[in-house]
Amino acid sequence: MADFEMSRATHVAADPATVHALIDDFRQWTRWSPWEGADPDLRRTYGGPEVGVGSTYHWSGNKKAGEGRMEITSSNPTQVVVDLEFVKPFKATNVTIFSLRPSEGGTDVTWTMTGQRSAVMGLMGRLFFDTAIGKDFDKGLAAMKQAAERG
């Protein structure tokens, strides 16, 4: 198994609390997640507390959206950690970390996903997955920036 890490970052002209609120509540992800348009009939189920540690989100959709589950496992003003489990179209377990750092005029946001890949997925990942996910992260961060800056 090979470890991998994918990160993207942006600057948001909004305070860290505003950005944190968009990440710490799975219901807010519909405003910025890059995968929201993958299936107009996506089924969503939320569980646990509305925000923060223990909050869960399950999705199930078409082949493009797939199926999976997320749970917030750690949350504080500077970081939100999400355990991510993909069920379809492939099985995978990853950790996603959103780091928030106050900076002049707003917040620097870094979105990182880590996990392990088999040898075959390691090669495929470097060739295809990393590029696609990187573009998705960039798209999501741009939408998050826009949502936070609008207020």
Image (cartoon, rainbow, N blue to C red):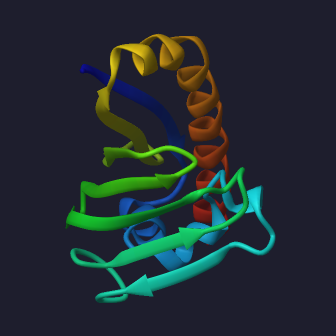
How far across and down, in percent of the image, does residue 124 sit?
53, 16
Q: Position of residue 108 (x, y in %)?
A: 41, 41
Q: Residue 76: in sight, yes or no? A: no
Q: Is residue 120 above or below residue 25?
A: above
Query: Which sits in the foreground, 105 or 91?
Result: 91
Q: Is residue 85 above or below residue 139?
A: below
Residue at the image point whose x is 71% and y is 50% from the top:
64
On the image, the x and y values in percent for residue 47 come to 37, 86
Q: Where's the C terminus, which quadrant?
A: bottom right
| Percent position of residue 132, x then y | 64, 28
Q: Nearer the viewer, residue 107 or 50?
A: 50
Farthest residue in the right direction? 40
Q: Quadrant of the N terminus?
A: top left
Question: Is residue 129 visible to us here?
Answer: yes
Q: Tell whether 58 sits left or right of 33.
A: left
Quadrant assignment, res 56 = bottom left
Residue 136 or residue 66, whichever sits in front: 66
Q: Residue at x 41, y 65 (%)?
A: 69
Identify the residue shown where x is 45% and y is 84%: 46
Quadrant in the rendering for residue 92: top left
The total of numbered circles placed on residues is: 0
> Which residue is at 48% across, 31% downward?
8
